[in-house]
């Protein structure tokens, strides 16, 4: 099997990990309830292993000196009623 090198930012890697985790959850708990679904336990296990590897990589990069963890953009302050201030 060939290795592939892909360069992504921390934010992109976090997004990919989140999407993969959601998809694996669907395949493990939701899809089996669908008529005609055929499980592939080896593929599910490989996906879980890959998510763990990517989380480890993200954790190592986040802990590296000089690099900060991905940050979300600040949200607008809201009024007590939950409606953002117009700007």
Image: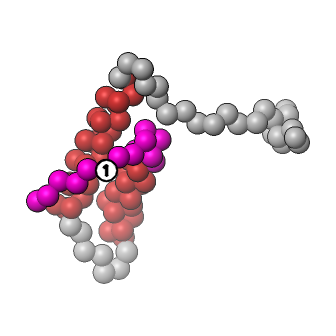
Q: Using the rendered image of the protein, determine whether residue 14 is visible from the camera's viewpoint.
A: no
Picture coordinates of residue 61, whole percent (x, y): 35, 30
Colouring:
secondary structure
Q: Position of residue 37 (x, y in %)?
A: 30, 75
Query: Residue at the location (30% across, 36% down)?
Result: 57
Q: Quadrant of residue 86?
A: top right
Q: Who's the residue at 55% across and 33% down the image?
A: 71
Q: How many marks?
A: 1
- For the stretch drawn in magenta, the main secondary structure is loop
**Relative height, residue 39 to residue 5 (above, below):** below
Extreme-top residue of the structure: 65
Asked if the stretch drawn in magenta spans residue 60, the answer is no
Kindly tell me whether residue 80 is visible in this rendering: yes
Label 1 Cα crowd, 10 Å radius (few <14 / some 14-19 / many 20+): few
Dot 1: what SS?
loop
Query: What is the span of residues highlighted in magenta in the rendered image?
Result: 1-15
Q: Quadrant of the N terminus?
A: bottom left
Q: Residue at image x 37%, y 54%?
A: 20
Using the image as rendered, state which of residue 56 and residue 48 is in the foreground: 56
Q: Is residue 71 left or right of residue 36?
A: right
| Residue 77, x across and y down, in percent | 78, 32
**On the image, which quarter does residue 32 sit in?**
bottom left
- Does residue 46 lie above or below 30 as drawn? above
Say whether residue 87 is left or right of residue 75. right
- Residue located farthest toward the bottom when viewing the structure as drawn: 36
Q: Nearer the viewer, residue 73 or 38?
A: 73
Q: In the rendered image, which quarter is residue 40 located in?
A: bottom left
Q: Which residue is mark 1?
A: 6
Q: Name the quadrant of the C terminus.
A: top right
- Taking the view exactly as shown, the residue that stands out farthest to the left is 1
Counting from the top left corner in percent of width and height, residue 11 is at 47, 41
Identify which residue is drawn at 31% across, 28% down. Answer: 60
């Amino acid at each position: 099997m060939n290795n592939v090198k892909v360069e992504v930012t921390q934010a992109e890697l976090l997004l990919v990990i989140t999407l993969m985790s959601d998809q694996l959850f669907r395949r493990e708990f939701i899809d089996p309830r669908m008529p005609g679904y055929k499980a592939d336990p080896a593929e599910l296990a490989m996906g879980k292993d890959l998510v763990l590897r990517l989380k480890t990589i993200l954790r190592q990069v986040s802990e590296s000196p000089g690099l900060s963890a991905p940050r979300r953009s600040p949200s607008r302050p809201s009024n007590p009623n939950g409606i953002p201030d117009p700007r």
